[in-house]
Image (cartoon, rainbow, N blue to C red):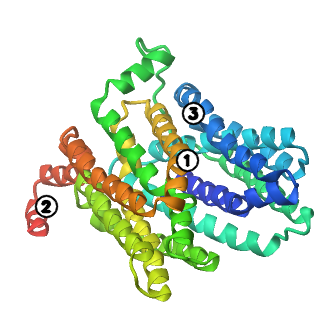
């Protein structure tokens, strides 16, 4: 990795570390510590999603016109101000405004950092770069949540203020780190005919492969990430009788599998077609939902139900490890020159939409309609496999399997052809 990529990865880890301090405790902070009630706490969580949906359509165009680094720095400062004010806020209006600033800043960070990774990597190194990003994000979230859990005390509001202050400090440290990044010169597209604000979106919507990838991405995030802290956890508690400590163990198992498996599966992913890797994730997640069904609908012991539920989260983690070096690099490879920011923002918008709808749909189903809930999301997982196979038909050979480009370059060199053939055999 070059110096710029190392700083980008440090930035990803720091931002995730800061978020890990506050995200698990936001509901408790608003509803109980500040005494604003569950309704206001629910509105705060909704504000995060709404803020992201509002700013992301504009973030992509800003990244294309100004570059990802200036947009990232503005987003970091906005998030830092939102986090600090949230830690000091006492009234509902101030809490909601602070949450909007924090949510908007967080939402813009994602496509800006992704575009910086694209600009600092090649098609051959991109999968490894995004795998490293995902690994560090999960590690940062896990470590931040662990440390935050030992610092926080519901009887002392000052302890929550400290958490939000640490989060704000992480964002400001990240500003200092990213300000030193020297980005490679990216192509400028401002003023190119047809690439106005509306033209960029029309061009994206005219890209059939990108549209199919966005549909696939919505289903991926709706059927997995959108259920972790809502429908699946409610199902585990209500149907399987899972304790809160076992739920924490399941979440830890998910993170642990990602951290252990991420680089182990990377070599496997780099040698396979991306569409087939995504299709295999759908099958793995279908098994995960079937195991969850056994945990809540089977008639085994409580120990067996708990083990099955923890295994469900572990299987989801394996699927996530396969997706991280696959989906994000594919978004970048589908983007025309200079339009990576627009495409990354569009995909982030789809992700936020799925994360907003997923809990609203899955939460009530998981808590009350246990059988239909499992069947519904098992079918969604199988749908991922079908959509991935269809997407593969829209991709070029190199888009679907970037390793083919490396093989062709070696063959054109002459002497290494025999070595390549032996390796392929």
| Residue sitting at x 38%, y 64% | 319
Can you say whether 399 is above or below 133 in the image? Answer: above
Could you say which is closer to the camera, residue 297 or residue 323? 297
For marks 2 and 3, give the CA distance.
46 Å
| Residue sitting at x 21%, y 43% | 390
Q: Which residue is mark 2?
A: 416
Could you say where residue 10 lies in the image, as x and y percent from the top left? 61, 59
For marks 3 and 1, give the CA distance.
21 Å
For label 3, the SS is: helix
> How many numbered circles does the render carry?
3
**Callout 1 environment at 10 Å: few (<14), some (14 to 19), or many (20+)?**
some
**Callout 2 environment at 10 Å: few (<14), some (14 to 19), or many (20+)?**
some
Q: Earlier in the sequence, mark 3 or mark 1?
A: 3
Q: Name the quarter where the C terminus is drawn.
A: bottom left
Q: Which residue is mark 3?
A: 56
Q: Which residue is mark 1?
A: 360
| Residue sitting at x 41%, y 71% | 292
Could you say where residue 52 lies in the image, as x and y percent from the top left? 61, 38
Could you say where residue 185 lies in the image, as x and y percent from the top left? 50, 35
The residue mark sitting in front, 3 or 1, is 1
For marks 1 and 2, give the CA distance.
55 Å
Can you say whether 307 is above or below 328 in the image? Answer: below
For label 2, the SS is: loop
């Amino acid at each position: 990795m070059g110096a710029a990529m190392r700083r980008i990865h440090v930035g990803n880890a720091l931002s995730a570390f800061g978020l890990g301090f506050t995200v698990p405790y936001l509901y408790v902070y608003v509803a109980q510590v500040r005494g604003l009630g569950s309704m206001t706490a629910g509105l705060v969580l909704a504000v995060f999603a709404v803020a992201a949906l509002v700013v992301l359509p504009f973030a992509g165009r800003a990244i294309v016109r100004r570059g990802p680094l200036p947009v990232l720095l503005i987003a970091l400062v906005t998030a830092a101000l939102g986090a600090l004010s949230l830690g000091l806020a006492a009234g509902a209006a101030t809490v909601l405004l602070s949450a909007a600033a924090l949510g908007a800043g967080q939402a813009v960070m994602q496509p800006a950092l992704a575009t910086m990774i694209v600009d600092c990597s090649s098609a051959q190194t991109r999968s490894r770069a995004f795998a490293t990003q995902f690994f560090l994000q999960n590690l940062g979230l896990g470590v931040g949540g662990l440390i935050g859990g030992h610092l926080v005390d519901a009887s002392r509001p000052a302890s929550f203020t400290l958490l939000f202050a640490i989060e704000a400090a992480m964002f400001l440290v990240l500003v200092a780190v990213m300000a030193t990044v020297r980005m490679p010169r990216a192509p400028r597209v401002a003023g190119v005919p047809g690439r106005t604000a509306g033209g960029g979106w029309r061009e994206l919507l005219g890209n059939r492969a990108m549209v199919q990838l966005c549909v696939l991405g919505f289903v991926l995030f709706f059927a997995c990430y959108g259920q972790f802290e809502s429908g699946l956890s409610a199902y585990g508690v209500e149907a399987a009788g899972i304790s809160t400590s076992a739920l924490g163990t399941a979440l830890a198992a998910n993170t642990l599998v990602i951290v252990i498996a991420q680089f182990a599966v990377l070599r496997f992913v780099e040698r396979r077609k991306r569409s087939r890797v995504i299709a295999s994730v759908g099958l793995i997640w279908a098994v995960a939902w079937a195991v969850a069904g056994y945990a809540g609908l089977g008639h085994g012991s409580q120990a067996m139900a708990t083990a099955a539920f923890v295994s469900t989260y572990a299987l989801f983690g394996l699927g996530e490890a396969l997706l991280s070096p696959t989906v994000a690099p594919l978004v970048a490879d589908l983007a025309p020159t200079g339009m990576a920011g627009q495409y990354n923002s569009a995909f982030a918008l789809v992700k936020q939409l799925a994360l907003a709808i997923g809990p609203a749909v899955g939460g009530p189903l998981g808590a009350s309609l246990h059988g239909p809930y499992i069947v519904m999301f098992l079918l969604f997982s199988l749908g991922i496999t079908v959509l991935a196979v269809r997407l593969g038909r829209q991709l070029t050979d190199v888009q679907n399997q970037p390793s083919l480009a490396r093989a062709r370059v070696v063959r054109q060199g002459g002497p290494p052809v025999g070595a390549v053939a032996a390796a392929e055999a």
